[in-house]
Every structure is written in C-alpha cells, then in structure tokens.
Image: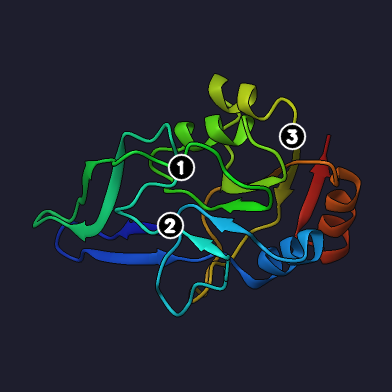
Amino acid sequence: MQTLFNGSLQGKRVQRVHTPAPIVTLLKELWGRIECDPCSSPDPDNLVDAKIRIMPPENGCKYATKVPTGEVDERGRFIYVDAPPGLDRWPLNTYVNPEFSDLEPWFRQFAESWEVAILAPARAHRKWFREHLRKAVIADLNPVKFVGHTQAFPSPLVLAYRGDHFRTFRHLVDSYGIGEARP
C-alpha cells in the first residue's frame, strides 16, 4: 500500500494507492498465493490478501528507520515516526509495494530475499537502485492505474522479481500485457 500527498497546501488530499488487480493476479498465478505483504493496509480497496500483513506504523523492513503514521500535519506533509524493529527476513512469496518516498531500505531487503516481488517507481539514475536489482528480473510497466484512480501514475514503474520462477514471471508479464520484462 502506498499513500501519496496530492495538491497544494490549501487543497491537501491524501491518496491511498493500492496495487492494481492485474499485478495481484499475476503474482497469485506465479506463486499460488501471496504469503507476506510487509507494507499492507486495512483499506477495503487493498486487493493483496496476503497471509501475513504488516501495516504501518508497524514496520515490515529491517532497514527502514522511519514509517508513516498515515496522517498529515497542518501543512499537508506526512507525519513519520521512528520505525520499530522491522521484519528481519521476508518469507517466500513476499510482495512489496513500499512507500515511494523512501525506497532504498525496501530495495536493500529485496536484494537479500528470494521469491519476492516489488512494485516501485523506476530509479535507474540511482546507484542503489541498480545495485539492488542486479540479480532480478525487471518488468518495465506500461502506465499503471492504481485501484480507485482514473489516471495512470505519472512516473515510470517497475515490477521486479527475484526467485526460481523467472521464466514464468517473464511469460506472465508478457501474457498479461502489463509491460516488458528484461533480464
């Protein structure tokens, strides 16, 4: 789950950004079920029905130092608190849709995990992004409309995968028509 701030300080509006159905369906076809969602949400729009759901301000990442409370201050900025200890290890079949404001800790744990997928903005201009995706299959996604939104997210997104089923992942990305997978 993702929460975004949209609008000027006068017209502040918090948006919940939940994974689109085709991505959830693709991952369920790949794994059978999603075992863990380390940054989940109790919102009814959340289509990721993982067995293990960690919801902020709980922390699903051992490297995250701040977590959002889900609230904004009087100026429309998100309120973050020091993160409690995060999940030391993600189980197999973990899907991550982290806060887009602080991606590096999540990609760091992704690089140490197996049978895991992460949905995030493309940050190819960042060294940490390239390093943490070195041994992953990356799908450059077509424009993505998150659940409840009529327009596509304004930045390029990737769905990256690490695991034993990389050929199946590539095939599913192609067959679902959501983007183009590259080694």
Callout 3 amino acid: Ala
Query: Which one is nearer the viewer's eye here, 7 or 169?
Result: 169
Q: Is residue 115 above or below residue 126?
A: below
Q: Assign a secondary structure to mark 3.
A: loop
Scheme by which the image is coloured: rainbow
Quadrant assignment for the C terminus: top right
The residue that disc 2 covers is: 54
Check disc 3 and report the residue beneath it: 136
Q: Going by the picture, which residue comes out furthest to the bottom?
A: 44
Looking at the image, which residue sits at the far left? 74
Pick whichever, 17 or 95, lies toward us.
95
Q: Residue at x 81, y 45 (%)?
A: 181
Locate residue 174 relative to residue 71 in the image: left or right.
right
Q: What's the distance in space between the residues labelled 3 and 1, CA to CA? A: 21 Å
Q: How many marks?
A: 3
Q: CA distance from mark 1 to mark 2?
A: 9 Å
Dot 3 or dot 2, earlier in sequence: 2
Please state the horizontal and vertical placement of residue 83, each as a whole percent of the image: 28, 40
Is label 1 in contact with label 2 (beta carbons under 8 Å)? yes
Local SS, label 1: loop
Residue 142: image tag: none
- Element assignment for label 2: loop
Q: Which amino acid lies under the numbered mark 2 shown in the image of this protein?
A: Ile
**Disc 3 from disc 2: Cα separation:** 24 Å
Image position, residue 20 (x, y; %):
60, 68
Q: Is residue 176 left or right of residue 133?
A: right
Which residue is found at the position 33% from the left and 52% from the top?
58
Amino acid on which the number 1 mark rests in the picture:
Leu
- Quarter of the rendering containing residue 15: bottom left
| In the image: residue 36, left or right of residue 117 | left
Q: Which residue is mark 1?
A: 87
The x and y percentages for residue 132 are 62, 27
